Amino acid sequence: GQQLNQSPQSMFIQEGEDVSMNCTSSSIFNTWLWYKQDPGEGPVLLIALYKAGELTSNGRLTAQFGITRKDSFLNISASIPSDVGIYFCAGQFSSGNTPLVFGKGTRLSVIA
Amino acid sequence: SAVISQKPSRDICQRGTSLTIQCQVDSQVTMMFWYRQQPGQSLTLIATANQGSEATYESGFVIDKFPISRPNLTFSTLTVSNMSPEDSSIYLCSVVGGSSYNEQFFGPGTRLTVL
């Protein structure tokens, strides 16, 4: 099935550093979402983006819906140990009633 | 957001047996989906669970292997039939609707190990 290209695959950073990860696709999406998954848990929605060019923040997290509708990035500022986990981007072709296409995930490790 | 529970949370099963996974939501939702997450991998859609009719399966997934029921707007089951070790995965249900029309939320997952 179709997948998004998510990078980097993994990151090791020092506590307090900023983090950036992104997703690209050959297809146009109407919605981009970013999820975080902790071990043994289901993905938790962090940010949802609905409009090309939209820039949305949620605390230390900022995400943007690319102007071409084929990409999105997620930034985490001033990382803390609890930011550790796997971050997934997901695209949606239509409205909320359609399933998601997921990136392969970015595994984030934070060194205290 | 909707509160989603799954049962069982984990199980270890023998090859050739079947396991039924339940997904319960605390409010009525319009859409329910089932995803599979193989070890160290991303999420792959298995099917859309349709209320009152047959599920819509993605390429590579068939009803005989993954029968799905959705008798009402708050409950669905996924059965993994005639299991093999390759079926060892996390199975996740996801919902859209309730108070968040456009956003998709996930249950905690069922971790299945097939010996």
Image (spheres, coloured by chain):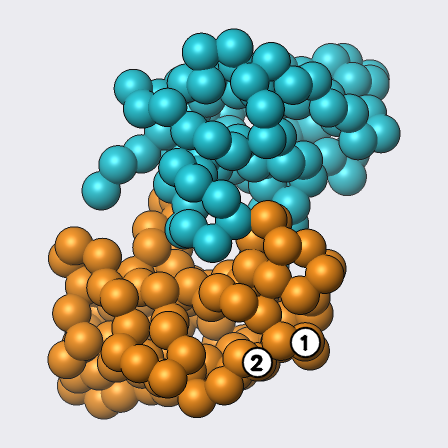
- Colour that chain B carries in the picture: orange
Q: Is residue A48 left or right of residue B72?
A: right
- Could you say which is closer to the camera, residue B75 or residue A20? B75
Q: Amino acid at mark 2?
A: Thr
- The reply to whether residue B31 is visible in this rendering is yes
- The reply to whether residue A87 is visible in this rendering is no
Q: Which mark is residue B74?
A: 2
Q: Quadrant of the N terminus of chain B?
A: bottom right
Up the image or down, B77 lies above or below A83; here it is below
Q: Residues within 10 Å of mark 2 (few under 14, many from 20)?
A: some
Residue projecting furthest to the top? A67
Could you tell which of marks 1 and 2 lies nearer the N-terminus? 1
Q: Which mark is residue B102?
A: none
For the point 63% across and 71% down, which residue is it? B4
Image marks 1 and 2: residues in contact by CB distance under 8 Å: yes
Which residue is tagged 1? B27
What chain is tagged by disc 2?
Answer: B
Which image quarter: residue B5?
A: bottom right
- Residue B19 point in image, percent of width and height: 33, 86
- Residue A31 point in image, percent of width and height: 51, 33
Q: CA distance from mark 1 to mark 2?
A: 6 Å
Q: Amino acid at mark 1?
A: Ser
For the point 60% across and 13% down, which residue is it? A53
What chain is tagged by disc 1?
Answer: B
- Colour that chain A carries in the picture: cyan
Q: Residues within 10 Å of mark 1 (few under 14, many from 20)?
A: some
